[in-house]
Image (tube, rainbow, N blue to C red):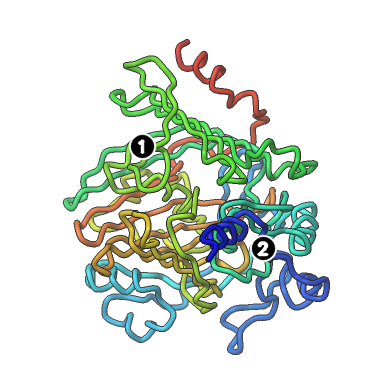
Amino acid sequence: MNRALPIAVALLSFTLPLAAKVSPEEADRLKTTLTPMGGERAGNKDGSIPEWTGGYTTSPPCYKGRGTRYCDPFPDDKPQFTITGQNYKQYADKLSEGQKAMFEKFPASYKMPVFQTRRTAAYPDFVVEATYRNALNAELGGGGEALVNAIVGVPFPIPKSGVEPVWNHKVRYRGQSGRRWNNQAAVTSSGDFNLVTLREDVYFPYAQQDATPESLNNVIIYFLQIVTQPPRLAGTITLVHETMDQVKEPRRAWQYNPGQRRLRRAPNVAYDNPGTGADGLRTNDQTDTFNGATDRYTWKIVGKKEVYIPYSAYRIHSDQYKYRDIIQKGHINQDLTRYELHRVWIVEGEVKPTTTHIYAKRRFYLDEDTWQIALVDIYDRRGAMWRWQEAHQFQAYDQPFPGIAIETIYDLQNNRYLAQVMNNEDPETQEMPFAPSYYDPANVQKQATK
């Protein structure tokens, strides 16, 4: 028997593109029964999820213009009902396991105000057009660790395998470049917290209107993070070049420590290494709910389901509230939240037996209209729920694309949590014309030592 043959076959299957593109007839559904991003245009049977009619793209009267705070375009909406620790079992079929765990853990205080469902998601025309082309052409390579023939839009609006929705989330359109203020609060069991403020500058080569796969130099995201507060961490820098083909070249990362005054390569900025300033409550691949390599997990699509998820999160994003108004003992101030019933894709990732990760299994709930990961149930090696994660999204109606008001990661075993991506007391996220040269390690080193 030729023992080299199975090895050769295995290598061949790993390097060749995996079938992902769909037929022209199936892709045309993005113009009829499906939204341009792959969601179902029709509402549900009882009307609690309405038909998608193009999203929300009109700036409301309260909005003061580009670069100012996104205000609530639905100020007269009231909760239709509130899910509490006393009645949550009535709604159990539309809750994630993590949500149920929160009601069990905080029966007297945790609640979910449920509002009218607003299908606000909308994108620029060039993103819509690119998503249609991707449906016809995009493939996976490298055993799922590389995008092939995808650019600008969602690569797999009609997904066929478990890792495809994850790629949709990772490269979903969020603008082309900009700066945001990310405030993180690592909250103790008593409700105390230390605030860490990070300035984050991001450039998306993948999302540039004239981009081609060949023009990317294998980089889909440039990311520069600088800690500005507290003083003991100020000046700490993380630089990331996220790659499109992660087999050809894994994520490039560097870190700068003010005490050492040198920008050094940082291969540990990946997977389950601790995130900056998060007091051990976040792994590096939990930034943006999930990012980076997927090769440590086996992925599968569980299906689609109607679930109450955070949405239209304008209130908790308001600059009328301080971080102390949002952060409370046990969980964030749920009076400031808004939940809506939406259809979600449910995708599970289980750690492969040949590798390791501190999270043995993760169940992701992705909004069908945006591919934003809204909820994540996270399990430890014993099969017990360990952490639960959520992202409160809203539509940036003047762009148009969805943004995030706040992300939370609850440690259900240690009664602690992390709130992040808050900018209520800082400037609104702004478009800024960064270029790839800005993210050159030599340039970052010069800026760091000035």
Real-space CA distance between mark 2 and mark 1, rounded to the nearest whole angstrom: 31 Å
x and y, in percent, of residue 196 in the image: 34, 35
Q: Secondary structure at mark 1?
A: loop
Q: Residue at x 77, y 60 (%)?
A: 137
x and y, in percent, of residue 138 in the image: 72, 58
Q: Residue at x 38, y 75 (%)?
A: 82
Q: Residue at x 24, y 62 (%)?
A: 412
| Residue 331 or residue 71, whichever sits in front | 331
Q: Is residue 95 left or right of residue 35?
A: left
Callout 2, which amino acid? Phe
Mark 2 or 1, which is nearer the eye?
2
x and y, in percent, of residue 434 in the image: 65, 29
Residue 312 seen from this side: no
* Residue with the mark numbered 2: 156
x and y, in percent, of residue 403 in the image: 56, 51
Residue 339 seen from this side: yes
| Residue 263 or residue 65, whichever sits in front | 263
* Residue with the mark numbered 1: 276
Callout 1, which amino acid? Thr
